[in-house]
Image (cartoon, grey):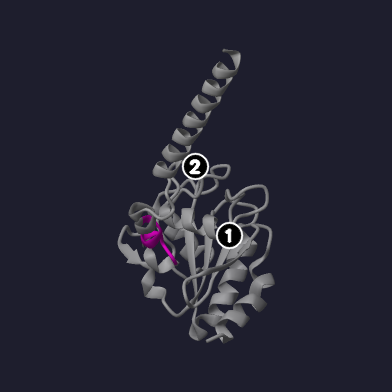
Amino acid sequence: MGTNLLKNSNWVSLFFLLLAFLLCFYTYNPFSSKTIMAAQDAPKSIYDFSVKDISGNDVSLSEYRGKVVLIVNVASKCGLTQSNYKELNVLYEKYKNEGLEILAFPCNQFAGQEPGSNEEIQEVVCTMFKAEFPIFDKVEVNGKNTVALYKFLKSEKGGYFGDAIKWNFTKFLVDKQGKVVERYAPTTSPLKIEKDIQNLLGSS
């Protein structure tokens, strides 16, 4: 009788194990039409995104197709602000006619160092820092309200100790096909990545 109970117990365990496997496979079947469609719908480059400029107008990033793009989260009151804007201006002036675009996204998530309205930010950036490259709508780059573009950027190039943006002036370099090729820490000065920009501008 004990042997029969053991056999029955083994069959019951096997049944539930098989049931659990089938449930898991049904829930996430890599070959299901839903999974395949989700993979097909997933963004493949920055060209799949639209953002808002500093005036609130929609801008499709497909406008930058064929260009090398440097994407930066900026702040007006950070210790890195002066040097970064100065060097970003140098890069933009030097390479804009060769196909470089710099896209700046104000963000107030780091010690509240970008507290102004869009109008105030634009005024400061244009008058104090003389930026000629595009400034976009203030965004969140971490947390539940992270904008879709930054979710994509972080998924393509994670950072040290996790994917979260660590501070103002984190930089993402994007090639002419809209693919993220490199991520740079806030403390990496823009001129330190000039060689990488040159290499991408020279590629077909």
- The residue shown at (50%, 68%) is 131
- Residue 16 position in % (x across, y down): 48, 29
Q: Earlier in the sequence, mark 1 or mark 2?
A: 2
Residue 188 found in image quarter = bottom right
Residue furthest top in the image: 1
Q: Is residue 186 above or below residue 9?
A: below
User: Which structural element holds mark 2?
Assistant: loop
- In three-dimensional space, the C-alpha distance between marks 1 and 2, rounded to whole angstroms, equals 17 Å
Question: What's the magenta region?
Answer: 38-44
Q: Which residue is mark 2?
A: 143
Tell which of 202 and 130 is nearer to you: 202
Residue 112 found in image quarter = top right
- Residue 156 position in % (x across, y down): 54, 60
Q: Amino acid at mark 1?
A: Lys
Tell which of 71 and 154 is nearer to you: 154
Tell which of 109 and 12 is nearer to you: 12
Q: Nearer the viewer, mark 1 or mark 2?
A: 1
Tell me, yes or no, if residue 30 can be seen here. Answer: yes
- The residue shown at (58%, 80%) is 200
Residue 46 found in image quarter = bottom left
Residue furthest left in the image: 57
Q: Amino acid at mark 2?
A: Gly
- Residue 103 position in % (x across, y down): 47, 66
- CA neighbours of label 2 inside 10 A, class few (<14), some (14 to 19), many (20+): few
Any mark on residue 157, and which?
A: 1
Q: Is residue 103 above or below residue 98?
A: above
The N terminus is located in which quarter? Answer: top right
- State yes or no: residue 80 in magenta: no
Residue furthest front in the image: 1
